[in-house]
Amino acid sequence: MPDATESDISNVEKGIFEAGAISKMLDEKLSLTDIAKKVTRDKNIKVIEDCKMPVYKCDCSKEKMANALSSIGKKELEDIIKEDGKAELICHFCNKRYQFNKEELENILKKIK
Ligand SMILES: [Zn+2]
């Protein structure tokens, strides 16, 4: 609140005091808007939805990358082992790098029927 006046601030402080601890409100499963209403005592308050940034969590894993490797085919995998002896896969979604050494590649190869 950059433009908050002295009385605004004490009003909010009073609101916080009356509303009780935020953690208690969270326990009561009040929404962020409800808490803001209680604290500021402004019934028309709106919580800007944009503040709730969706956190994108990639569910990639080394196991999934191994599956991707096994799907390239037995021959291709054999070539990689022969030529490079290792492989590095980068997740297209989160740019996480997964490295596979020769032993790991051979294990993946063994699982390919
Ligand atoms: Zn990822």
Image: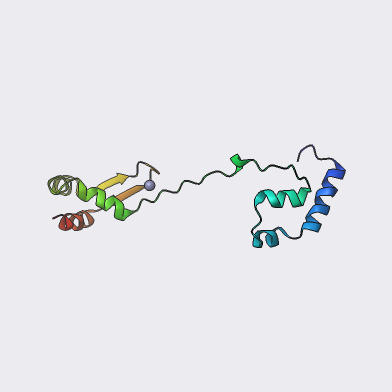
From the viewer's side, name the closer residue of 24 and 78.
24
- Considering every residue shown, the one lying at the far top of the view is 3
| Residue positioned 25% across, 52% down in the render | 67
| Residue positioned 69% across, 51% down in the render | 34
**Location of the N terminus (image quadrant):** top right
Residue 49 in which image quadrant: top right
Horizontal and vertical percent for residue 102? 21, 54
| Residue positioned 83% across, 53% down in the render | 14
From the viewer's side, name the closer residue of 43 and 56.
43
Seen in the picture, residue 94 relative to 62 is either above or below; the reply is above
**Location of the C terminus (image quadrant):** bottom left
Horizontal and vertical percent for residue 88? 28, 46
Horizontal and vertical percent for residue 28? 66, 61
Residue 92 in which image quadrant: top left
| Residue positioned 29% across, 45% down in the render | 89
From the viewer's side, name the closer residue of 100 and 54.
54
Horizontal and vertical percent for residue 15? 80, 53
